Amino acid sequence: MIPAIETAPVLSLRPQDVESLVDDLQAYHAIYSPLFQRREQRQWSADYLRGLLLDIRRKSIEPMVLALHGADFNAIRAMQQFVSEGAWPDETILNRHWRAVDETLGDEAGVLTLDGSDFLKQGNESVGVKRQYCGEVGKRANCQAGVFLGYASELGYTLLDRRLYLPKEWVEDDDFAERRHKCGVPTAISFQTKPELGWEMIREVVDDQQLRARWVTCDEAFGRDTAFLDHVAGSGLWYFAEVPHDTRVWLERPLTAVPEWSGQGRKPSRERLCDGQHEAEEVASMAARVPPEQWQRCLIKEGSKGPMRADFWAMRVVTVRDALPGPEVWLVLRRHIDTGELKTYVCNAPAITRLETLARLSGMRWPIETCFEESKQYLGMGDYEVRSWRGWHHHMTLCILAHFFLVRQQQRLKKT
């Protein structure tokens, strides 16, 4: 049996709880400071981290510098240059961060959590900004869209990596060429979907081999992309992905064959469903036919208001790939006890996996959503005013480090 996993504990530490721990922040920054090539970069990165942890109303560059250095306009310009234009290596810093995450939170059953987070913006000068669906307000709005990778284990949760999503016209339309140039978008960049960006981050963590993980969880924005799921499966990880209700599967693998050649035209080479085989059916239709006695009530996680439970049903099914049978996976149905709201998932974990484990995995997306809430509320994740490609990624890198500082402090204070 695959053992059930525990959900992650809530981060209860806030920036105001560590205001006096300047020495601890300096020691934490020392993990990353050697990766900055210049002394000025080391100083400004330390100041930026400290600014993100200040108890001030808004954490864009000017308010942070004013709080740290007073009305020093040279310092404001220097900080702006450090974030927007500074040539310091995000990738190297994040690679070191992954090792630190493994040292603090790492577990063989660790979960990589993938989700998007959007940022409302005024005007059209910020990199990647467009009127598009914005999760922050639940409707179309002028915003930037980010894709983030997080990590969760029984010990806690944090963020690992980030990518800015560029709408297709931002990458390919000649009308956007001037804006791309002004924002410093790399000239060699090509359009990537959000699942492609998500897989790129997962692949880099897997290839790095520093952070222990077993699972990947994501919502249906990623789960509906079968190429993404197959990439994750090919990496050796087990995905637990929410999928749309109209996702089609087979209860049994249908027979396929290459049609016999009629002697005319091109000789068939691609398999097709044999005559008389059932078509794949929607998972919502399957859910409607589950007998009441087959639903099992399982614990999802321990919440602040008590245990969170739901009714579950799971069965091995065959997925659809290009209208043909694909990999065999778990189909997992989750039904809200009071409202009856249905969630549908697919999971490529082994057939011996317990239902209790699958139920717990259905609750493992909340850590990354909580990371966004904490980072936006306490760490200024959405307060940035930089417009450049480099500036967006620099800011998010430092927000990721600031969040993990709080995680490490909570772990240390628990021990003492």
Image (tube, grey):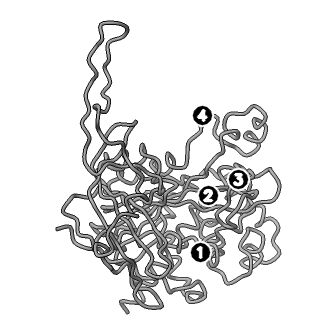
Q: What element carries label 1?
A: helix
> Would you name the residue on which mark 2 appears?
394
Q: What element carries label 2?
A: helix
- Foreground: disc 3 or disc 1: 3
Report the Cα–Cα distance between label 4 and label 2: 19 Å
In the rendered image, which quarter is residue 410 located in?
A: bottom left
> Would you name the residue on which mark 1 appears?
373
Image coordinates for residue 394, horizontal then vertical, percent: 61, 58
In depth, the one of 87 and 9 nearer the eye is 9
> Would you name the residue on which mark 3 appears?
132
Identify the amino acid type marked 2. His
Identify the residue shown where x is 73% and y is 62%: 120
Identify the residue shown where x is 66% and y is 72%: 380
In depth, the one of 342 and 38 nearer the eye is 342
In this rendering, the answer to whether 393 lies above or below 404 is: above
In this rendering, the answer to whether 119 lies above or below 153 is: above
Q: How crowded is mark 4: few (under 14 residues within 10 Å), some or many (20 or more)?
A: few
Q: How crowded is mark 1: few (under 14 residues within 10 Å), some or many (20 or more)?
A: some
Image coordinates for residue 78, horizontal then vertical, percent: 74, 61
Q: What element carries label 4?
A: loop
> Would you name the residue on which mark 4 appears?
188
Image coordinates for residue 359, horizontal then vertical, percent: 34, 72
Earlier sequence position, callout 4 versus callout 1: 4
Identify the amino acid type marked 1. Glu
Report the Cα–Cα distance between label 4 and label 3: 24 Å
